[in-house]
Image (cartoon, grey):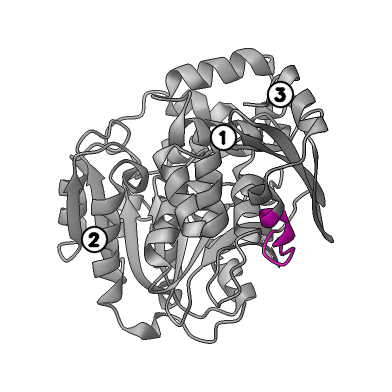
Amino acid sequence: MPAGHERSRASSVSAPPRTLTALIDRFDPEVMELPGGRARIRLEVRGQGSWDAIVDGGGACLAPASGSAHAVLSADAATWVTVGRDLRGGMEAFGAGRLSVRRNLHLGVGLLAATSGATEEGRLEFKRARTRAGSLSYLQAGPGPAVAVALHGLGATKISLLPTVAALAPDMRVIALDLPGFGDSAKPLGAPYDARFFARATVALLDELGVERAHVIGNSMGGRAALETGLSHPERVGRLVLLAPSMAWRRERAWAPLLRLVRPELGLVQLAPRGPVEGLVRRLVPGGADGWSAAGVDEFLRSYLTARGRAAFYAAARQIYLEEPHGENGFWPRLRTLQPESLFVWGRQDTLVPLAFARHVTDALPGARHLELDCGHVPQLEAPEQTHAAVREFLLSAPVTAASRSRR
């Protein structure tokens, strides 16, 4: 959290540590897209003080900590030395909880990438693409020619797939996308925010980046979007990895008639003050006060506490609940037509997409592969080693021609 009054005052009269100075001296503006054009990112050295990295399109500089910051990075002195030596070490420190990144992870992790000093092809980068589906924010790492696109779940952002990017980047180019309505991507009012809409956005990004064919990885709502990309655009998909994907409910949906009458645009009005909303969300999310859960809550609130972000969230949630399971255009009959090879990863403790769905998927897709893990709804965060080992094996056994004509 931001430094207290005494710590801020101390930082204003002392020079920043050499580790922080060296980081900022390496800042590369080509690596980090700034949504607002300028950002103040607080760097806390626990027990020593706090300084702000002032970042804009022309570079970055250090200043005494002052006022409010867009993002806050906090670690002890030894961890900052590790961060300064190697970005991968910094990401490991982040995952292990020794480095805290709060408020805006696009800016916080983006600063780490931009100050890593990396120049090789496949370095971690935060980018923006202007597509026919609107402005889309994404991060990417890894060399080609194989490409994988990763899609996040409801209320999450591309940052929830950072461990997946890190795990696969040594072998392929991995692009984690903020789906429209979430994170730093465009949030058009009145958009359907259904699986077909997200699939079109995914293909629009591939078109803009010059990628003809890619593997698609998705978690939860992103898993449903990945499936839709494979159903509607099979020629653009290599293989599919579905991490606890959301699916049409097979049982009766008691609230469906009423929900059809409720417009998601009601989300434009915030009915409760920010304080109670934030407190409620953190109480509902296990571990919502620290670690990955706290960072995920920060990312959720960053969108949800804006009018367009709320409208997009409600619209997407509404579409998930109302999707027709049966009939000519229903989800389950359509699933039988899926062409790309698929790996489904299920969590035995998942209460949102129970393991029972695996049996229904097997009935529809006898050739699909399945992996059951002792985790909940977010395998890439809850069981990262097992999840990513299986994903790497599955994708690397596919032909390298999964992508071609790739431009950055």
Q: What amino acid is found at the position of numbered circle 2 in the picture?
A: Ala
Kindly identify which residue carries mark 2.
390
Task: Tell me the crowding category of disc 1: few under 14, some 14 to 19, or many 20 or more residues within 10 angstroms, Cα based.
Answer: many
Kindly identify which residue carries mark 3.
7
Indicate the position of residue 158 as horizontal and vertical percent values: 53, 51
Examine the residues drawn in magenta and state their main secondary structure.
loop
**Left of 27 or right of it: where is 38?**
right
- Badge 2 or badge 3: first in the primary sequence: 3
- Magenta region includes residue 83: no
Would you identify the image quadrant in which residue 4 lies?
top right
Tag 3 secondary structure? helix
Picture quarter with the N terminus: top right
Question: Which stretch is magenta?
Answer: 22-32
| Tag of residue 217 | none
Indicate the position of residue 207 as horizontal and vertical percent values: 60, 75
Q: Disc 2 to disc 3, how far (Cα)? A: 46 Å
Q: Of tags 1 and 3, which is closer to the observer?
A: 3
- Badge 1 or badge 3: first in the primary sequence: 3
Tag 2 secondary structure? helix
Task: Name the residue nearer the viewer: 95 or 83.
Answer: 83
* Vertical comparison of 71 with 363: above or below: above
Residue 17 in view here:
yes
* Vertical comparison of 54 with 404: above or below: above
Look at 76% across and 31% down and name the residue there. 11
Kindly identify which residue carries mark 1.
300
Indicate the position of residue 295 as horizontal and vertical percent values: 52, 35
Task: Name the residue nearer the viewer: 233 or 259.
Answer: 233
